[in-house]
Amino acid sequence: MGNRIGPLFLDDTDGMRACTAAVVHSRGRNLLITAAHCAAPHGTPIDGLVFAPGYRDQRAPYGSWPVTGVLVDPRWGPDENEGYDVAFLTVGTLNGRQVEDAMGAYTLATGLGFGLDVTVTGYPNSAVSPITCQGRTTSRSNTQQRFDCAGFTDGTSGSPWVTGQGQVVGVIGGYQQGGDSPEISYSVAFGSRLADLYRQAGG
């Protein structure tokens, strides 16, 4: 299932690595989730992103999928409100297939609260392969959740927090754009605001 996760690049897989994203289920079978600061810094969507699921050792075994749309909550905005640091990305087809048909997808879950056992996988810019860690979510505030595990450095923003049931319940982002320390990561708490955005994105 880790092949549903990959880095986002600018322009192509030879370009600069931006962040991490994951495939989530949608009606159009073409949806990713990441952090808003990855795809729409200061509220302005980035053009030319591509997604490389299962990327490792400088190879994209499942191809690179062009990002065709970026959706963020309007309250994210130019000031980058940390309570809305989540983005949904639509991707175009590759060889006539939608990304969910090729890779499968996680489900998105909201309103499950804190204290969840999750696996977090991300792509540090300094590494050739992804890192994975298991832990339990805790509350930082009503709108932010926390995950403690070392190694989540630049490039891992947007990394999905996945339960044993394959549910995405967070992505690295939010407070301190996901954390000032590699040992502590944050995410927006997935509640009704995110559920509304997901529906808008076609979930």
Image (tube, rainbow, N blue to C red):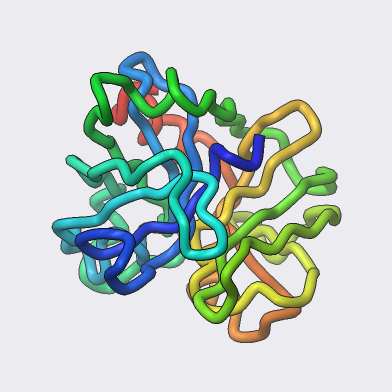
**From the viewer's perspective, is 159 left or right of 96?**
right
Q: In this rendering, is residue 93 above or below 168? A: above
Q: Residue 26: image x %, image y %?
A: 40, 21
Placement of 165 over or under 43, stated as above or below: above
Residue located 78% across and 46% down the image: 118
Q: Position of residue 90 (x, y in %)?
A: 28, 36
Q: Quadrant of the N terminus?
A: top right
User: Which residue is found at the position 36% from the left and 35% from the top?
Assistant: 197
The image shows residue 2 at horizontal and vertical percentages of 64, 42
Decide: is 55 above or below 71: below
Q: Position of residue 156 (x, y in %)?
A: 55, 67
Q: Is 8 displayed left or right of 5 in the figure? A: left
Where 38 falls versus 150 (above or below)?
A: above
In the rendered image, which quarter contains the C terminus? top left
**37 vs 13, nearest the viewer:** 13
Q: Residue at x 46, y 31 (%)?
A: 195
Figure quadrant of residue 151? bottom right
Question: Horizontal placement of 151 versus 196: left or right?
Answer: right
Q: Which residue is painted at 49% across and 71% down in the image?
A: 155
